[in-house]
Image (spheres, coloured by chain):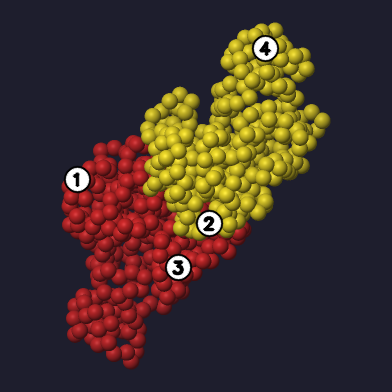
Chain colours: A red, B yellow
Amino acid sequence: MIVPPRPLGTDATIGILGGGQLGRMLALAAARLGFKCHVLCPDPQSCAFDVVRRVTEADYTDKDALDRFANDVDVVTYEFENVPAETATFLSARRPVLPDPAILATTQDRLVEKSFVTSLGIATAPFAAVDDRAGLDAALAAIGRPAVLKTRRFGYDGKGQVIVRAGDDPGAAWNAIGRQPAILEAFVPFSREISVVAARGRDGGVVVFDIGENEHRDHILAVTRVPAAISPALAEAARAIAGRIAGALGYVGVLAVEMFVVEEGGGRVLVNEIAPRVHNSGHWTQDGCSISQFEQHIRAVAGWPLVAPLRHGRVEMHNLIGHDVAAYRDWLTVPGASVHLYGKPVVRPGRKMGHVNRVFHD
Amino acid sequence: MIVPPRPLGTDATIGILGGGQLGRMLALAAARLGFKCHVLCPDPQSCAFDVVRRVTEADYTDKDALDRFANDVDVVTYEFENVPAETATFLSARRPVLPDPAILATTQDRLVEKSFVTSLGIATAPFAAVDDRAGLDAALAAIGRPAVLKTRRFGYDGKGQVIVRAGDDPGAAWNAIGRQPAILEAFVPFSREISVVAARGRDGGVVVFDIGENEHRDHILAVTRVPAAISPALAEAARAIAGRIAGALGYVGVLAVEMFVVEEGGGRVLVNEIAPRVHNSGHWTQDGCSISQFEQHIRAVAGWPLVAPLRHGRVEMHNLIGHDVAAYRDWLTVPGASVHLYGKPVVRPGRKMGHVNRVFHD
């Protein structure tokens, strides 16, 4: 990988792979710092295109387009974790790509990811590999029920997973996830799900945002509340875990670690998932802190110093999903609420259309 | 003028005249709300061009370019108060232009502006018109010395003005400002200069931000501190004045009213100047409040509701002027500080290159 020799100058251009709302908000954060951005995305209606001067509408494997893109930018980053390996390899030979796409081999596969986390001595829910139908029976015998069967790759927002309860037919579950390499995880009796959003700079320094607590509806994040209602000791343990993961990955940029809080034995956290990117559960930082997750990420990939955020109060982030986006009108006049809309031209059920950050001084 | 019949939809495009940092920050605020922006500016290096997809690089009087621009946008606003009258007239026949450019006839001329303010029963420093060299002598006799001789039009950041003290040659002052229509103002012994940034919606509702206190260096704003160190009664009077001015102008959008605080007689305020646009002294709202002056302006011109801001603490805004912009590096790691750089390609003495908003929870 090409490592940039020094911090980017303020005249630099940052290349962003992916034109969704995360790419859009990364570009908006970069603009505050004076950087130019160039977004590459195959979707002509990419909402990130609207906030930058230079765009490339091309497939991620279009070598000519990638070459032009690389020549126009000083550093490349990405908004999503499923960057094709050949894209990453092609770009990495031409420009620094941060975070290092080699990390994606770990986080794109739930089994590799969980194995990596446990190799650090960090707890997860008990899990077992499931390579075939017989393997599922063996895994169920080892893990017990209820358990969650998940595809190893390309799962998000509850897609590619199914719960196997007592009495359920394992064959139906195996069919439901498409009979592909999977992982079976124990269904842990967690009291809450928390997100730890951490930034790691090129110098190895780590800054962790205050911990948020997530509420999902229909497997999609609905609300994040900050701070999470957990003990200071547990919060400190969770922050340390995120820092250790970022360090062990040699990560540069922002990542989010989703964890379950289990109350047994006085309370502890289990790592559920690593998102190697800015994350929906960190959107509250835009209005709740002196620095957002997006700016922290841009600073990291630019080689600029990170800074500890000053949090302005208690914060709630409410997602605006699908046709519920119409609720933005009511939010506009709520005291302390900041409305964010992504400019997506088409509303679809389950589609993330915007969010609201509400700060409370109490 | 064409008045838009209803609030803009989230798919609307906002046209912005002027591509400097104010246009840039208006576009960034509009993007948060999902709007697209189209910036028109003659300068090919306009820093606002970098944060929007659609730009028109053309002179403000290029009718073909203005026509294409108008056809592409749903509403037009502007970042500067010297929009040529013919530009405003041309665009107003095609699209709603907000705030109504007719207001500029009042604020582009210091004499008309001061006369307007006093006609509302609002105090200013004593002033007199100066049409020629003899008129200056008459004005000095009426106003006394020291006094400030200012051109009626096109003055900003201390340009086009000169102080006439006891013993100074009036002829030299008259020459210094280029022997053009002017206004002579009494040099009032003010204790501080404050800025009242107010937004007025299409429905006539007014929302005023907390009042900032300005510190200038070399006639350029250097620091704004919020809240201003004035009594609650004086602050309330100042807010009311800004609201009355906005209402009397039929203003839609954000304006800033600069006022002098004089301590005589228990303290009162004198209106110094009206800026019919978002203003440098309102930049602190970006990080100091739940809503910025830029978003409040965009909401107003879009016909969206305004909202009372929640201020997160004491705030200082520090301008980064000319080569002092290099100080941004030190600010990056100051707790509670948010750095804004404008992406201007060339540094010039006196040029506004960026600013820093610092929030204190104390």
User: Label 2 sits on what residue type?
Assistant: Leu
- Label 3, residues with CA under 10 Å away: few <14, some 14-19, many ≥20: many
Closest to the observer, A338 or A54: A54
Earlier-in-chain disc, 1 versus 3: 1
Q: Read off the residue under disc 4.
A: B133
User: Label 1 sits on what residue type?
Assistant: Arg
Earlier-in-chain disc, 2 versus 4: 2
Q: Is residue B353 above or below residue A151?
A: above
* Mark 1 vs 3: CB contact within 8 A: no
* Mark 3 vs 2: CB contact within 8 A: no
* Residue at 25% from the left image edge and 83% from the top image edge: A174
- Element type at mark 3: strand
Q: Residue furthest bottom?
A: A167
Q: Read off the residue under disc 1.
A: A94
Question: Does any portion of residue B22 appear in the rendered image?
Answer: no
* Mark 1 vs 2: CB contact within 8 A: no
User: Label 3 sits on what residue type?
Assistant: Ile
Spatial separation of the CA atoms under disc 2 and disc 4: 51 Å
Q: Read off the residue under disc 3.
A: A321
- Element type at mark 4: helix
* Residue at 25% from the left image edge and 52% from the top image edge: A100
User: Label 4 sits on what residue type?
Assistant: Arg
Tag 3 and tag 4 share a subunit = no
Whole-percent x, y for residue A288 in the image = 51, 54
Judged by depth in the image, the label closer to the viewer, 1 or 3, is 3
Spatial separation of the CA atoms under disc 1 and disc 3: 38 Å
- Label 1, residues with CA under 10 Å away: few <14, some 14-19, many ≥20: some
Q: Quadrant of the C terminus of chain A?
A: bottom right
Tag 4 and tag 1 share a subunit = no
Closest to the observer, B182 or B298: B182
Judged by depth in the image, the label closer to the viewer, 1 or 2, is 2
